[in-house]
Image: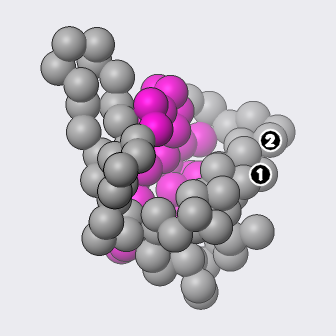
Amino acid sequence: MIALSAKPRLAPKARLRVDQKTGETLLLYPERGLALNVTGAEILGLCSGERCVSDIIAELAQRHGAHESLAEDVRTFLTQLAERSLLRGTEP
């Protein structure tokens, strides 16, 4: 599980792009891509390498209200992307 003190950012091979036709946010990486839901796009939009995971969780809680599983959901999502080498700065 990604540490709360980690400061994730997209790996150089990955980038976010909004599809002009559908409005979906896509996570593009070599020869592949993922269509992100609104929450996933928002989380990755906060992964600048300057905010730590706990800051990202706090920002989301401030925007949308905290809920019981928010921290775990964010950490699980970021951990899955880190395991696919789509994030850097995932070590504290």
- Coloring basis for residues: one colour
Q: Sort mark 2 into few (<14), some (14-19) or many (20+) by Cα contacts within 10 Å.
A: few
Compared to residue 77, the image places residue 68 above or below, namely above
- Which SS type dominates the magenta stretch? helix
Quadrant of the rendering where the N terminus is positioned: bottom right
Q: Position of residue 12 (x, y in %)?
A: 29, 70
Q: Nearer the viewer, residue 64 or 27?
A: 27
Q: Position of residue 18 (x, y in %)?
A: 24, 31
In the picture, the disc for residue 69 is: 2
In the picture, the disc for residue 72 is: 1
Q: Nearer the viewer, residue 12 or 44?
A: 12
Q: Position of residue 53 (x, y in %)?
A: 57, 65
For residue 63, say whether it is visible: no
Query: The disc labelled 2 sits on which kind of residue?
Result: Ser
Compared to residue 79, the image places residue 22 above or below, namely above
Q: In percent of the image, x 77 and y 51: which residue is there? A: 72
Magenta segment? 34-63
Q: In percent of the image, x 72 and y 45: which residue is there? A: 73
Query: The disc labelled 1 sits on which kind of residue?
Result: Glu
In the picture, the disc for residue 32 is: none
Q: How many marks?
A: 2
Q: Nearer the viewer, residue 6 or 55?
A: 6
Q: Are marks 2 and 1 in contact (CB under 8 Å)?
A: yes
Q: In percent of the image, x 41 and y 46: which residue is there? A: 32
Q: Is residue 40 magenta?
A: yes
